[in-house]
Amino acid sequence: MNQWLVQNDFTKLTFFGQDWGGLIGLRMVADNGDRFDRVAIGNTGLPYNPDVSESIIAKVKAFRASPLKLNLFSMQKQISKMKGIGKDSGVDLFAYWQKYTWETPDLPAGIIASSMMEQRSKLSIVLELFMGHIGLRNISPFRTQLTKAYEAPFPTPAYKMGPRAMPSQVPTIPDQSLEAQKKAWAFFAKFKKPFLCVGAGNDPVTDGFEKVWLAKVPGTKDQPHTNIGGGHFFQWAKAEKLAEILADFIKANQ
């Protein structure tokens, strides 16, 4: 991403990142601060957890290596118990998402996205999963347009290694990214340009993401931080409202 940014010589930018857009993009901002005039983030963060307790680290590693087999519903049940971002908060529960995605070769990416953005009964999801399991997903009457859209990039399960592997790369416990994350936080601790936090406020995985930014980043002062609902994928569920907020943010901070 840094190479792409520099080679295209982009400047005077406004950054907005959600989920992996923030995990990747915030490091890019930190490495190229002079190219960005303002920053906004939602349902994301810059995980830096050098002090996660040894008991939690051991628990997560043991769980990842355990023979327990998860399905979509058993994973979602655990994830729903998360209470947002905080020290040790939800690290062991997030491991259910990491284990499920890594150990599910035909990850139902479309169904996962659909279940977060559409009102669907559990029965319709079960039936759609079953039709896919027996090789009839493309003619399934239970498959929504949203499911089709999010499955389109993956003609076969072999193409799903990216979304399967990425959750395990989130540094919920100390790993090889620790120093780079520390360096990025040192940058943002001095970041005085406009910085806005706008999230869903009803996503169990990322609720409270804004607290650490408001406490550490000077540029967050006097900005209209807010939550607008819409769940984890609020940039689609609340697209018009989010676009309005970001446009106002840019206009107010010329």
Image (cartoon, grey):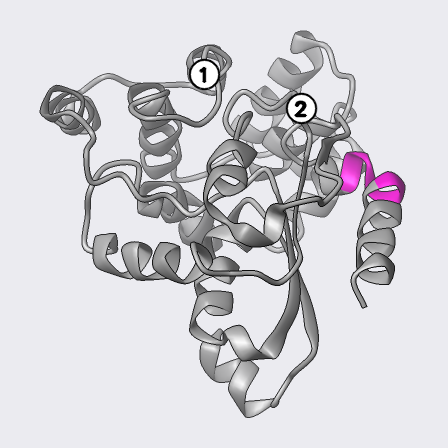
Residue for point 84% across, 49% down: 243
Q: Is mark 1 on a helix, strand or loop?
A: loop
Residue 197, above or below 25: above
Is residue 128 at all visible to an observer of this figure? Answer: yes
Magenta span contains residue 230: no
Report, in whole angstroms, how far the alpha carbon at label 2 lies from the one at label 1.
17 Å
Magenta span contains residue 238: yes
Q: In this view, does 227 lie to the left or right of 145?
A: left
Residue for point 40% across, 48% down: 166
Lower position in the chain sequence, tag 2 or tag 1: 1
Q: Is residue 141 left or right of residue 95?
A: right
Indicate which label's residue lies in the foreground, 2 or 1: 1
Q: Name the residue under label 1.
A: 82
x%, y% of residue 126?
61, 14
Span colored in magenta: 236-241
x%, y% of residue 226?
73, 33
Residue 117, above or below 195: above
User: Split into 4 quadrants, where in the image is the C terminus?
Assistant: bottom right
Front-most of 240 and 35?
Answer: 35
Mark 1 is surrounded, within 10 Å at the Cα level, by few (under 14), some (14 to 19) or many (20 or more) other residues, namely some
Q: Is residue 223 left or right of residue 216?
A: right
Q: Name the residue under label 2.
A: 115
Q: Name the amino acid type tagged 1.
A: Met
Q: Is mark 2 on a helix, strand or loop?
A: helix
Q: In this view, does 186 lie to the left or right of 227?
A: left
Front-most of 134 and 126?
Answer: 126
x%, y% of residue 102?
33, 38
Q: Name the amino acid type tagged 2.
A: Ser
Residue for point 42% across, 47% down: 46
Secondary structure that dominates the magenta span: helix
Front-most of 116 and 184?
Answer: 184
